[in-house]
Image (cartoon, helix red, strand yellow):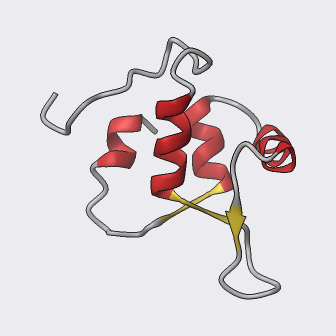
């Protein structure tokens, strides 16, 4: 999944799953859980026993604030037309 795909999703779903984020960064899901544990990203549950979800805008902000740390394979695009 490309970052551009995340920015331009038409389903208006404000959440991303752990799997989607892991795929975006080309890492395993355990890495996403470690980032959460370190406080780098925050998860939310829609119900107490539900899956952990991450707010799309918070993930985009995380990427923007950590451009120097993000893999060079991920191209940060300014808009969906690029």
In the rendered structure, the answer to whether residue 24 lies left or right of residue 26 reads: left
Above or below, 71 relative to 65:
above
Q: Residue at x 39, y 47 (%)?
A: 6
Residue 36 at x, y percent in the picture: 79, 49
Residue 59 at x, y percent in the picture: 54, 47
State the quadrant of the C terminus: top left
Residue 66 at x, y percent in the picture: 57, 26
Q: Residue at x 32, y 68 (%)?
A: 11
Residue 31 at x, y percent in the picture: 80, 37
In the rendered structure, the answer to whether residue 25 lies left or right of residue 41 reads: left
In the rendered structure, the answer to whether residue 51 lies left or right of residue 3 reads: right
Q: Residue at x 71, y 31 (%)?
A: 27
Q: Residue at x 62, y 18 (%)?
A: 69
Above or below, 32 relative to 82:
below
Give the total number of marks visible in the rendering: 0
Front residue of 18 and 39: 39
Q: Quadrant of residue 5?
A: top left
Above or below, 45 relative to 23:
below
Which residue is at the far left? 81
Which residue is at the far bottom? 47
Above or below, 64 relative to 18:
above
């Amino acid at each position: 999944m490309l970052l551009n795909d995340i920015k331009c999703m038409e389903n208006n779903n404000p959440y991303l799953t752990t799997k989607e984020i892991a795929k975006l960064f080309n890492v395993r899901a355990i890495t996403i859980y470690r980032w959460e544990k370190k406080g780098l990203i925050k998860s939310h549950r829609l119900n107490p026993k539900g899956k952990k979800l991450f707010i799309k805008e918070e993930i985009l902000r995380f990427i923007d604030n950590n451009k120097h740390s993000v893999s060079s394979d991920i191209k940060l695009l300014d808009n969906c037309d690029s």
